[in-house]
Image (cartoon, grey):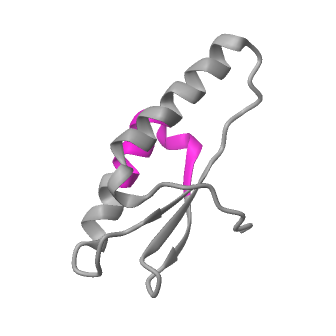
Amino acid sequence: MAFHLQSRPSAASDAAKIDDLLERFFGAESVDSVDLDIQDNEIVYRINKPIISSNEELLEFFKSLKKLFESTAEYTPHFTQIHV
């Protein structure tokens, strides 16, 4: 997942807000920051989700993803292909 940060002066506080939301929705142990591109003001995260073994777990994952997208709309959340 990637997010566009608003501006350089607020990049640190924007990143902290996104960090908090990711940890709240997916758990601190499931989220890694993998890239910060200062030039493009973009931060990339990896959500490490274990194998989903039931439809309920799958539904909860997508509900959390929807909440994350709604809560971070101002940062243009999107999927990315960066491999780190």
The quarter of the image holding the C terminus is bottom right
Relative to 34, is 37 above or below?
A: below
- In the image, what residue occupies the spot 77% across and 29% down? 51
Q: Is residue 31 left or right of residue 51?
A: left
In screen coordinates, is 60 left or right of 57?
A: left
Residue 23 in view of the camera: no
Outermost residue, left direction? 9
Tell me, yes or no, whether the highlighted magenta stretch contains residue 31. yes
Picture coordinates of residue 43, whole percent (x, y)? 48, 68
Residues 31 and 78: in front is 78
Quadrant of residue 53 within the rendered picture:
top right
Q: Is residue 69 magenta?
A: no
75 lies above or below 35: above
Q: Is residue 27 above or below residue 81?
A: above
Q: How many marks?
A: 0
Vertical position of residue 50 compared to residue 55: above or below: below
Residue located 39% across and 36% down the image: 24
Instruction: Look at 30% across and 63% down and name the residue there.
Output: 14
Quarter of the image where the N terminus is located: bottom right
Which span is picked out in magenta?
A: 18-32
- Left or right, 16 with respect to 67, comes to left
Residue 26 rendering spot, x and y as whole percentages:
51, 35
Q: Main secondary structure of the magenta part?
A: helix
Q: Position of residue 70 (x, y in %)?
A: 38, 40
Residue drawn at the location 72% of the way across and 64% of the way down = 81
Residue 30 pos. (x, y %)? 58, 42
Q: Is residue 68 visible?
A: yes
